[in-house]
Structures are given as C-alpha cells and as structure tokens.
C-alpha cells in the first residue's frame, strides 16, 4: 500500500510551544489514549507528535473519536492534507450509534469540512449521516480559499448554545444557528475511498486542544450570511448586520393582496409559524391571489424557506411594480418554486427554464440533485440583487444562476420569453417582493431581507 509520509522539516516549523492557558490538550503527542477508531479501515497512527491518517481503498468513512463529550467550547488544531483525493473533516457535537449502518456502527453529526478540491469549501459545516450540507462556503464566498496541500492549516471551531462558528487560518468561514445538537464527541475523520488508485493519501492532525467558553472570541464581519435554521428568528448579529423579518411567524403584518388594499380574506393562512397558500386545485390566483410586501426594494439580500406538496407550483417574485394591471399573477422577475417531477411546467419553456430555482422563463437553474430537498421538506431560497444590478439565485446554500438586470444579454432573453410584451420588463428601479398563489398548497417561513446600501464615503 502506498504511504505518504510528510517531510520532517514541514512539521518542525510548527513545533514551537503554544500557550496552554485555559486550554486542555485532547492529544498529548505521545499516545493515542482517549481516542477510539470507528467505521472504515483507514489507519490512524502516532507519528512525530501528530496523528497521521493513511487512507485505505474500498472502505467507508473512518472516524477517530474522543471518549468524552463536549458542549460549549473552542477547539483548535493544525491539519495537513496530502492530495486532492483525500477528503477529510473534524466531527464536533457528534454521536456514535453502534446499531447504525445495519449494526456496523455510525458516527453522525456536525462536521468541519476539509475540502482539497477546487470547490474550496474547507471550513464549511456538513451534517454527517443526516442532512448533509448545512453551511457550504458558497454562502460566504469571500472566505472560500484553496486548501494548500502539504502545508499545515490552523482551524478553529467555536460552539456556544445553538450556534457554531468556524475559522480557517483566522478567517471566519461559517456561522450556523441550529437546535439539533448541543453536545457530543469530537472525531477526526477521512471520507470513504472508493478505489486503490485514490487510496494511500494522508492527513496529519496535531496540536489538538480545547477550552470551555461563555462567549465567542469575535463576531463575523458585518453582513456575513448566517444559516439560521430556527424558524422566523434573527440572532443579535443578524439584526446588527441589518437583517429584518418580512414575516414574523404570527401575523400578516407588512403584506397585502397584490391588487387589494388589505390582506386577502381567503386563500392564505398563518398557522404554526408558517404562511400557507391554501390549495385551489391548481387554478392560478383563484383563491386569495398573490400577496406583496407593503415596502418596495432596490438592492437587497432576500432569504426564505419554502415547503412544497406533491405537484406544487408557486414562486417568489421581485421588482414587482403592479403597473401592468394584468389578470392572474402579477408581473415580475420570478424565483420559480415547482415540483419538477410532477408539475408539467417543468417540461415547458426553453431548456428547463421553468424548473425549481430558475429565473422563470428566462434562465435555467443549474442545481446539483443533492441540494434539492424532497417534497414535504423545507428548502432555503435566496435572491441577491447587488447595487450594480447583478443578481444571484441560491438553493439550499448553492448558487444556481446569475445574471445582470438590464444588460444586452438579459434583454435578449426577455425578447424570446413570455415577458416580451411588457416594456422594460424586470428593469424597474425598485419593486415589491411577491409570494405567488398559483393554486397549490405551499408554505413559507423565515422570510428575511437585508438592504444593500452604498458604503459611506470617508473624507
């Protein structure tokens, strides 16, 4: 079996004593006591005051786990990855179920990703064995940096209450608010290796230390996107960054019917923290009709959760002016919400430009299947309109399309779409946010917006 041993000189550079005030070593550099191997057959060895992992072929993911559990803490370590085929991570607040995987055992829970591929999602948060990606680093693109191979990288994880934050070489990469786990084991892991040709890579973990915390060491830069899975709630940091809820989970305050002075008397329902569209058997605007925000917006970051029923059709529209006075749904740029498998609209339009997360009838969303949550599960949509009219659509943390409002390319798309009859379609300087009533049962929650403004110029 191929073995990759890191050059001694690379390790010596980093062997200087670190301050241990309030810190507890989880690995003393002399033995592997206090750790236990679960899962696949990749090897965890003691090597020059480090834990060296050598990947094995045709084996599931391998985990090297602490015996103790930890709740609110800061965890630091240094990590070195040998090659782009060796994907790894650090489990935190995780768990071991000996009955999982048909009795083979299962480690599951939050994972700090070590991603050596061109995707550059090191520091993102993955939910191993459960929900998969919770915070892909595409949500914080300024923090996405290549993981330098064969060089030690300093990582930091801080967990406090329901919030977890991660850093790579001192740069904050992810901020997750989630109520699933409040304590658990820590584990070093390497992902499954499918073949001999990709096996034999190595990961080094060293200077692993932990301390209890009662507050975070620092806040993220203002405007950093927080993946907040608690419905209809903003953290203090989100409020400080300028986020506001457009739906409070209890009332219809801030909304009205698209062509009404007030909120529709039928067709919509607030229940259990959800804003529900009541089914009218697929007839567009046959119930209560679309609803729009009272306010209008220019440049913004809009985030929302939605849940579909089988065969559902709906949408979130933006730059809605209502000046068209058309029948049916109001006109605007639309983030499509659709059951691509069952609704016939998915096969209409051009090249799939009416499918989920697409810019309806204009641009097709390029969405990996693993980032499409099943019907009946919550999905997170996001629309960013920058000050320069660049627009991005996201689905469950992944950017699926982008375009420039008002550009020649955009106008060419409009010219061959259903919107060609509307002058200057999609180019209004501001407009309402709209939730579409298309006759299908759909639910919305956690609708929040941050206004993007010109930076203050200093003299």
Image (cartoon, rainbow, N blue to C red):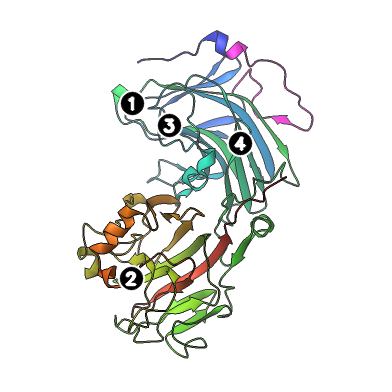
Which image quadrant for residue 427? bottom left
Residue 125 shown left or right of residue 211 in the figure:
left
First to last magenta residue range: 11-32
Q: Nearer the viewer, residue 430 or 396?
A: 430
Which image quadrant for residue 26? top right
> Whole-percent x and y of residue 45?
51, 20
Residue 36 shown left or right of residue 307 in the figure:
right
Q: Nearer the viewer, mark 2 or mark 4?
A: 2
Name the mark on residue 87: 3
Report if residue 24 lies within the magenta region: yes
Q: Secondary structure at mark 2?
A: loop
- Residue ID at (53%, 40%): 142
Which residue is the site of mark 2? 423
- Residue 63 seen in the current view: no
Mark 4 to mark 1 CA distance (whole Å): 34 Å
Which residue is the site of mark 1? 57
Which image quadrant for residue 315? bottom left
Q: Nearer the viewer, mark 4 or mark 1?
A: 4
Which residue is the site of mark 4? 171
- Residue ID at (44%, 60%): 381
Q: Secondary structure at mark 4?
A: strand
The extreme bottom residue here reads 265
Q: Secondary structure at mark 3?
A: loop
* Secondary structure predominantly adopted by residues drawn in magenta: loop
Report if residue 428 lies within the magenta region: no
Q: Could you classify mark 4 by the number of other residues whose Cα lies within 10 Å: few (under 14), some (14-19), or many (20 or more)?
A: some
Q: Could you classify mark 1 by the number of other residues whose Cα lies within 10 Å: few (under 14), some (14-19), or many (20 or more)?
A: some
Mark 4 to mark 3 CA distance (whole Å): 21 Å
The first of marks 4 and 3 along the sequence is 3
Q: Is residue 24 above or below residue 262?
A: above
> Whole-percent x and y of residue 233?
61, 65
């Amino acid at each position: 079996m191929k073995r990759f041993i890191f050059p001694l000189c690379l390790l010596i550079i980093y062997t200087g004593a670190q301050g241990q005030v309030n810190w507890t070593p989880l690995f003393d550099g002399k033995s592997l006591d206090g750790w236990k191997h679960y899962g696949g057959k990749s090897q965890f060895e003691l090597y020059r005051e480090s834990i060296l992992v050598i990947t094995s072929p045709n084996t599931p993911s391998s985990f090297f786990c602490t015996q103790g559990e930890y709740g609110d803490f800061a965890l630091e370590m240094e990590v070195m990855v040998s090659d782009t085929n060796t994907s790894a991570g650090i489990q935190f607040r995780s768990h071991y179920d000996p009955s999982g995987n048909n009795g083979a055992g299962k480690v599951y829970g939050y994972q700090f990703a070590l991603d050596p591929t061109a995707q550059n999602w090191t520091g993102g948060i993955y939910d191993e064995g459960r929900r998969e990606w919770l915070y892909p680093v595409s949500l914080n693109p300024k923090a996405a940096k290549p993981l330098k191979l064969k060089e030690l990288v300093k990582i930091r994880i801080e967990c406090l209450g329901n919030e977890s934050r991660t850093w790579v070489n001192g740069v904050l990469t992810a901020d997750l608010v989630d109520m699933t786990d409040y304590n658990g084991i820590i584990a070093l892991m390497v992902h499954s290796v499918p073949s001999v040709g990709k096996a034999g890579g190595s990961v080094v973990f060293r200077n692993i230390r932990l301390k209890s915390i009662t507050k975070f060491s620092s806040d993220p830069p203002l405007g950093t996107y927080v993946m907040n899975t608690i419905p209809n709630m903003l953290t203090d940091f989100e409020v400080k960054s300028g986020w506001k809820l457009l739906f409070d989970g209890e009332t219809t305050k801030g909304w009205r019917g698209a062509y009404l002075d007030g909120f529709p008397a039928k067709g919509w329902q607030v229940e259990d923290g959800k804003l529900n569209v009541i089914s009218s058997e697929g007839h567009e605007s046959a119930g209560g009709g679309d609803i729009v925000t009272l306010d209008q917006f220019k440049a913004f970051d809009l985030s929302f959760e939605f849940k579909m029923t089988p065969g559902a059709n709906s949408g979130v529209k933006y730059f809605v002016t209502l000046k068209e006075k058309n029948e049916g749904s109001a006109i605007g740029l639309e983030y499509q919400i659709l059951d691509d498998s069952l609704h016939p609209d998915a096969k209409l339009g051009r090249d799939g430009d009416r499918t989920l997360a697409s810019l309806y009838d204009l641009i097709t969303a390029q969405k990996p299947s693993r980032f499409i949550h099943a019907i009946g599960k919550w999905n997170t949509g996001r629309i960013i309109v920058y000050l320069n009219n660049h627009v991005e659509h996201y689905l469950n943390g992944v950017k699926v399309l982008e375009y420039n409002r008002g550009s020649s390319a955009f106008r060419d798309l409009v010219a061959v779409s259903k919107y060609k009859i509307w002058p200057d379609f999609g180019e209004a300087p501001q407009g309402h946010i709209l939730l579409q009533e298309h006759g299908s049962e759909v639910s919305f929650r956690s609708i929040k917006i941050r206004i993007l403004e010109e930076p203050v110029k200093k003299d």
